[in-house]
Image: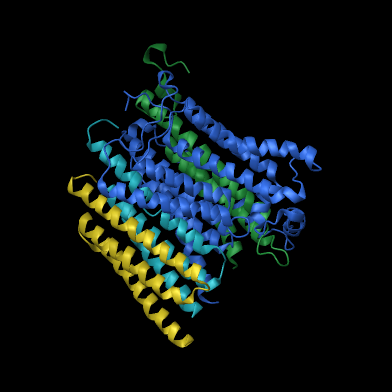
Chain colours: A blue, B yellow, C cyan, D green
Amino acid sequence: MSVLPVLDLVLIVLVIGLAAWTIVARDIFAAVLAYVAYGLLLAFVWIRLHAPDVALTEAAVGGGVTGVLLITAGKRLGALKASEAGAPPGLVLKLVAGALALLVAGAVAFAVVSLPTSAPTLAPEIAAAAPGPGAGLGNPITAVLMAYRSFDTMLEKVVLILAVLGVWSVGADQAWGAAPAPLRKPPPDGAMVFLAQILAPAGALIGIHIFWVGADAPGGAFQGGALLAAMWMIAMMARLTEPPRVASRRLRHALISGPAVFLVIGLAGAFIADAFFAFPPALAKPLILLIETFMVLSIALALPLLVAGPPNGSDEP
Amino acid sequence: MSLLVDLFSLASIGAGVFFFVAGTVGLLRFPDSLTRLHVLSKADNLGLGLIVLGLMPRADSLLEALKLLVTWALVLLSGAATSQLIGRALRRGRK
Amino acid sequence: MNQFLLAGAGLIIVTVAIGLARILRGPHDIDRLMAVQLLGTGGIAALLLTAYATKVPGVDDVALGLALLAAFATMAFLNLVDADEGGAGS
Amino acid sequence: MSPALLSGLLGAALVGLGLYGLIVHPHPLRKLLAFNLIGSGVFLVFGIVARRGAAAGFAFDAAPQAMVITGIVVAFAASALAVALILRLAAAGGKVTLDPKAWAKPDDGGAK
């Protein structure tokens, strides 16, 4: 192993370079694109840390969906004059901010370097306790998300839905209940329709595959759901389908189904198993699979709705 | 046999890397957006394709080899369609 | 052989990163976007090479996910550019 | 240096860079980018804790990694909410400055 350390070093210099470019670039759109490239490279760093699950999430959410969100915002706001953004900071503020940033970065670096040599770990505990008898989860990360720390995962879904509510409430009063603006205004090009017609079904299959293998291999509800979300966005970008009306009952039910099913089964755990959010050993695997299916649905709906933005009256662009 | 596989991988991956280098040089040196678009597709299609070809005999299972192939096919499809769209946007003066 | 795969990965990452100078230079936003697309493809290639050299499991799925999203940013960008020129407002 | 240590130092550098950008940039979208840099820096520090937590027989400690996965999704949700607010601000006033003086009406005597 002699090339690998060099590769790591190159990767890290690159990531820092791109991060620095998002901060110092003059052009706002250049900064946004540097951030998208940064997200792609970060997925690579996670692979080097032996975290393919995180890499997959980072690639789909951090690089892909966030990229579309920021490119849309950057391109729209780039049309504004620079003077509308507020006064640039003075030299004193820059120096103070630089000193503060150096101090904080130094403190974090010191903490990283001086981590105890015998690191505390939950790995054996998770392996022993979380999959439990009969749960049969070979992928420890899925085990943590669905069994060992399942309450956190449920609350995380609630946060996602609160964010959707927040985005919806930003819209104008008279637009309430309408659909968000379509992701593309002019009629789509033939090439884009063709691309979406192949990419979206293929991607949906791959998303479901990644969700399905998540029990034993890298993958799971988050990663699969994020990929499905991206595919729905591709279909909307080519106008194969339109954003749904936010007043739609079916949409709202589907959106909350993930945390709702999770909560109901978790509460039932207090009676049919020995504790709140515990699964009876014999039923653990099918119950976890049921919860995960609805979680995938919630994630795949929530992420595109967050990108699509607030409801929009049909007359207003 | 394994020497033969290694030689094949060596040649194919080497050629793939060459096309990535060529694509980057073109992206930096070519004078306008349309010519840059042209070199970009070389790196996308040939560069990744040759690397996938070189890695395929090293795959542990048939499924793994198939995944490599699908990865390339998806990039090929995306590259072809977006090149078309970018080219069209450029011709209409949308940059 | 593994050293060769890793060297290939490193070489691709370095060259593609040099190509990112297009994000700095522009001149158009579309040129910047092309540099990001090249980084995406190069990233997939380097990822596959590294995966086969270091045998980290699950990397092929990550590459598959990245390949699915290769056109994602470009599609979003072109939709906005087309809308701008349509004269229908932003 | 091991990749874990390198990535940890990378995380520290990202936190510093992001903090600087968050303070210095007047544009809210640039602040959001900077804030996301801080976030991913923190995630990376979590990542090395996970990698170092590799006990015998395990490649990593799954608990911090699972938290990073949920964290990435929550960070995205927060970013989306922020972008919606920024775009609404731009649509409402034609400007995105966070400076209260710029938003004060000329006839109320610059009241804060």
* Quadrant position of the C terminus of chain A in the picture: top left
Number of numbered labels in the structure image: 0
Q: Position of residue A107 (x, y in %)?
A: 63, 51
Residue in the foreground of this view, choosing between A84 and B55? B55
Q: Residue at x 33, y 32 (%)?
A: A83
For residue C13, above or below residue A23: below
Q: Residue at x 50, y 60 (%)?
A: C61
Residue in the foreground of this view, choosing between A25 and A297? A297
Q: Position of residue A91 (x, y in %)?
A: 44, 40
Whether residue A23 appears in this view of the structure is: no
Furthest residue in direction right, as rendered: A274
Q: Position of residue D110 (x, y in %)?
A: 42, 16
Res A218 → quadrant: bottom right
Residue in the foreground of this view, choosing between D2 and A278? A278
Q: Is residue A23 left or right of residue C27?
A: right
Q: Is residue C61 left or right of residue A242?
A: right
Whether residue A284 appears in this view of the structure is: yes
For residue A256, above or below residue D3: above
Q: Position of residue D62 (x, y in %)?
A: 67, 56
Q: Residue at x 53, y 50 (%)?
A: A224
Residue in the foreground of this view, choosing between A198 and A26? A198
* Quadrant position of the N terminus of chain A in the picture: bottom right
